[in-house]
Amino acid sequence: MIIVMNFKAPKEQITAVENKLVSMGVETNLSKGVARTIIGAVGDVTKIDTKLIEALPGVEQIIRILKPYKIVARESHEQNTIIDINGVLLGGSTVQVIAGPCSVETQEQMDLSAKAVADAGCRLMRGGAFKPRSSPYSFQGVGTEGLSMFHKAASKYNLPIVTELMDVRMLDTFIENDVDVIQIGTRNMQNFDLLKEVGRIHKPVILKRGMSATISEWLMSAEYIAAGGNHNIIFCERGIRSFETAYRNVLDITAIPVLKKETHLPVIVDPSHAGGKAWMVPALSMAAVAAGADGLLIETHPNPPEAWCDADQALSPGELKDLMVPLRGIANVIGRDL
Amino acid sequence: MIIVMNFKAPKEQITAVENKLVSMGVETNLSKGVARTIIGAVGDVTKIDTKLIEALPGVEQIIRILKPYKIVARESHEQNTIIDINGVLLGGSTVQVIAGPCSVETQEQMDLSAKAVADAGCRLMRGGAFKPRSSPYSFQGVGTEGLSMFHKAASKYNLPIVTELMDVRMLDTFIENDVDVIQIGTRNMQNFDLLKEVGRIHKPVILKRGMSATISEWLMSAEYIAAGGNHNIIFCERGIRSFETAYRNVLDITAIPVLKKETHLPVIVDPSHAGGKAWMVPALSMAAVAAGADGLLIETHPNPPEAWCDADQALSPGELKDLMVPLRGIANVIGRDL
Amino acid sequence: MIIVMNFKAPKEQITAVENKLVSMGVETNLSKGVARTIIGAVGDVTKIDTKLIEALPGVEQIIRILKPYKIVARESHEQNTIIDINGVLLGGSTVQVIAGPCSVETQEQMDLSAKAVADAGCRLMRGGAFKPRSSPYSFQGVGTEGLSMFHKAASKYNLPIVTELMDVRMLDTFIENDVDVIQIGTRNMQNFDLLKEVGRIHKPVILKRGMSATISEWLMSAEYIAAGGNHNIIFCERGIRSFETAYRNVLDITAIPVLKKETHLPVIVDPSHAGGKAWMVPALSMAAVAAGADGLLIETHPNPPEAWCDADQALSPGELKDLMVPLRGIANVIGRDL
Amino acid sequence: MIIVMNFKAPKEQITAVENKLVSMGVETNLSKGVARTIIGAVGDVTKIDTKLIEALPGVEQIIRILKPYKIVARESHEQNTIIDINGVLLGGSTVQVIAGPCSVETQEQMDLSAKAVADAGCRLMRGGAFKPRSSPYSFQGVGTEGLSMFHKAASKYNLPIVTELMDVRMLDTFIENDVDVIQIGTRNMQNFDLLKEVGRIHKPVILKRGMSATISEWLMSAEYIAAGGNHNIIFCERGIRSFETAYRNVLDITAIPVLKKETHLPVIVDPSHAGGKAWMVPALSMAAVAAGADGLLIETHPNPPEAWCDADQALSPGELKDLMVPLRGIANVIGRDL
């Protein structure tokens, strides 16, 4: 950690900062440049709250050299982590496509969805029983009953299931209903109590990026889960908020290579929520696989125009199946399979 | 609601959209322009999920004419709502300054803080017992015990207390500890289960704007609380995320007049989190009052460099007291008091 | 165009708006909904400045149904436009890689660069003689002399040259030096006088997206060029500005399919400026081709660490050559060559 | 300048970086922390292009300690610069309101505008003869003739005139027509050739902030002008681009205190373009003065609904006059006049 002092800071202020750092258990070294004095803090600075130093008189700026995340950092764990989801491996050489409807509606719809997902060659299934909706007047999901409909439909095809947890009080219900992968949605990326709870179990967690979360904040949210003991974390890029109004979000493709460099954990992409329109999904999916994503989270529905939720972004079973062909082709080009 | 059809949409697609709308309980009228056919939907369209229509073949775009929020809209309630917080009125002609430390630390610190807040002439006090921190390794707040320390310190000066609720499971504890105003933080603006819970009680709720929430999304989150029966909602602008790196957030001053136009509920501003530095607080506070804010949420600490959290953004007791003078002057210029 | 009146607007205000529209040469039709009166304007509304209507009393909102761009719109020209750059076709089934150094430095450096570009199998070459630098103290390019060095080096390999024009007064010099493609940089996307000038010639123009330009503004800037008579326009996505600080810009991959839908003109991607680091270029390039880009603009240098400008984002000749292999593989997967 | 080496960087890479820095004329010192080696560069590093160092093998990150701007920095010139515009002082204790229409239309409109501006008590006048419009089909300004109409109208009331220069080739015409203050618009903030040209004259220049320019980039654009010899620069905040769609731009009020700290030059605010609606102008203007702005740039028109451009954001003469009262009141509260 580097502390840049104001160019007018008198000697006493510099000494006070040094003393504070020493009291926090780190060593300091002083460097006087032409225009600024700089204090270097050496030792275990990861847990020092920089804002406490910034409050001292004469401090102009604090620069962290070390990253504030540890367990999730590739620096602490060089090899890629491969997560085993009931036998389906995510994060290895195979790119996994997780497909399914936006929301669980009926048993029949889930049965048809599971069939479509399996027919397309996907090995994992998604679907929401509890839906985060910006309006209180929109459909909020079918609830707990949806979990059992989902489980019943998916198990017929041996598809592990992925579904979103919004409320800490529902975690036990998710466990009882044999949810295989818990999804933390974009609006809950910094719901720290929820992160702590899923850190206490050992099920894989898909952590979606907050709408305007930086890569660093996202890694820190994963660190919350990891710090609790659960290292089965999958990052999911789903588009970020920008000034552009022509599409719902901007898929941040650059996040893929950057995360793969910063963390050993798998990274997947949700092209459905990123673009917000079914016709954009193929281009975004192919781009994601080409950029190195370990998986995709794609919305599909047996009959998109009749979907109860996000109808405009769901692929039909045929569209999903067709998309798998070029996705597999691209995966092969970069030495992976799908 | 207006549905713009693609310029190539054949008649059957137009008819299908009309039929769908009619099945949803609204009337339609057709307008054929030079280049596009447009379908108008007339009736109670507020609860129609536009995405279900957008999924129909031939639909190019849907435009909502009516706002999706109702209870919180000024259109439904012309007069300003004045919220009574144990006798302190917020939203009327008096601008209220809510001051206090970032976090509850010790009984002594809270006693000194309460004294400083009362001495400066403020009538409400803030302080956090549970802190949302981006790092799991940062100080997380002193917890439940902090609520009683806070209550004890503030009651000596008859200051109603404002504190943040992060976890639905803690709501009863907040009620038992006589918290006067519940704050929903920026990271929880779309934690819908939390919004639903505070919608069931009748305590005033300060709803902070999400880091990159639009005005419309923010109003919809308030609508979640209001739909549950609790209409005592206070909006708090606290800076939005932008590309700028010279300060933590960009205080969105325009949100004040826009919200005052769109809703009858009070609007306050948090200048401390917006700028992120104590030296910016006076300028931002004065701007907020000048722009029409009904109140301010300001961080102060008996000894800022020793604060356990956000030390660099807290005003000292003397700075707070000094700031009240020009704030009162500006309030008077625009016909209010403070 | 649709004009939404305020719910309190009296009849006279509605009539005044109708009269204004009629005076502007369009027909109107009135639709009274439950809560709002809506006026539809039918006819050639493209050239109506909506802000003139918004200023009228009682108007709440104006909604444009038709896009404000014409010549560049796919609606006016269904087939893809293929641009012939001295025999190299851009916009057809072949994906073109335009490679070369950030800036022209010396004749030797340009000779080595041209050789590397040709060796890698690229058919077009880039290089800057005039450089837009955020600091007045940074290297500003070698100037006019650089154009002739560039031309000399590239012609040996029959590579048409692409270079940036910043100053309207230099256009003649660019023409005299046989520049094949004129690049308009991101900072000049709305330098309307420059757009008008390149609209008067017939050389192909690469129009880079402004740092925070919407798709619609970008199309309108192209319309400026097209309105002058020059329809040889190539869009170049180069990353947009966001809140993220881990990389220079966010490559907006979604812009590719969206532009291909909105316009008949070619779309290329600059992965070098998007990420800002050489190690990110392969992933971003592959993603761009997978998403449907018609070409790439890649920085390469005979010896990156010695480059005079943007040294950290240039590929070495070997890296460029290696990258062409998977790019070609991905192009083939989606039915193109490269 | 601080160079952070990768934790795996071998000794030779560290030495190579040190040698490169020494060859650039600066001294280095090495600091080995627990996890990283850090190289400090001491000396005149302002002109070093950090990207040339970042390209060296083993370099992880470069951190600039010194600001890259010099002449415009308050560090180099502690006192506020007061700019004398034909006897009207900007940047001192008096807040100046620069008012006038968006565009010059007719002599009569300019005569009425000048009268309104003077009647309201403003001492400077604005108006555009050349207009940057996003559509080539929108009104582009009346051109050179407009400059003489403007001059004639304003001189009757001794109002110095402010008008926008878009094209380097028009600078002589602006000088011949006695333009008092040259405005560089938001779309040209990084039109470096234009900045260099206005750097060669001595007329005051209003430099508007680019739509998504950081404070640092904005200061660097001013440095371009200053480096040419013209130090009469006025910063104008006019709203930045964000994700919010409820208003045109977000007025960045925080930029005012931050700029006042970073530079000795005056800072003004354009509330008309920030909000984009006349009804927002009073709140934003009051906030700007309260936050410490040295002036305002306000659009007014003798008859707003008939304005040829930006009709919805112009104040009427009466509204302008009324607004001056609270603005003066707020200026007085903070010890200034207006």
Image: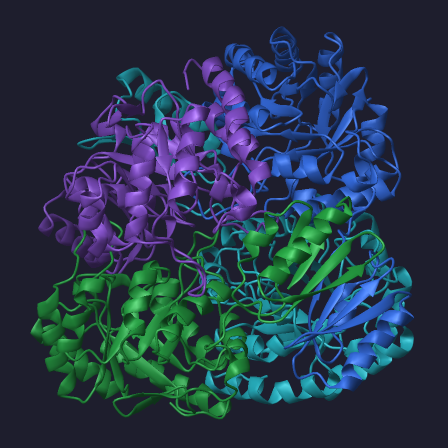
Chain colours: A cyan, B blue, C green, D purple
The answer to whether any part of residue C128 appears in the image is yes
Q: Is residue C334 left or right of residue A126?
A: left
Which residue appears at 40% of the width and 61% of the height?
Answer: C210
Toward the viewer: C146 or C97? C146
Q: Position of residue A265 (x, y in %)?
A: 55, 63
Residue D231 sits above or below residue A264 on the image: above
Q: Is residue C119 left or right of residue C40?
A: left
Extreme residue toward the front, this view: D108
Toward the viewer: A117 or C333? C333
The answer to whether any part of residue C5 appears in the image is no
Toward the viewer: A216 or D208? D208
Q: Position of residue D245 (x, y in %)?
A: 59, 51
Residue A227 sits above or below residue D298 on the image: below
Quadrant of image for the C terminus of chain C: bottom left
Q: Count all numbered tags in the image, as a single digit.
A: 0
Q: Position of residue B247 (x, y in %)?
A: 45, 37
Which of the 4 quarters of the picture holds residue D141?
A: bottom left
Residue C323 sits above or below residue C141 on the image: below
Which of the 4 quarters of the picture holds residue A314?
A: bottom right
Q: Position of residue A333 (x, y in %)?
A: 47, 86
Which of the 4 quarters of the picture holds residue D76?
A: top left
Quadrant of image for the N terminus of chain C: bottom right
Toward the viewer: C121 or D167? D167
Which residue appears at 13% of the width and 73% of the height?
Answer: C147
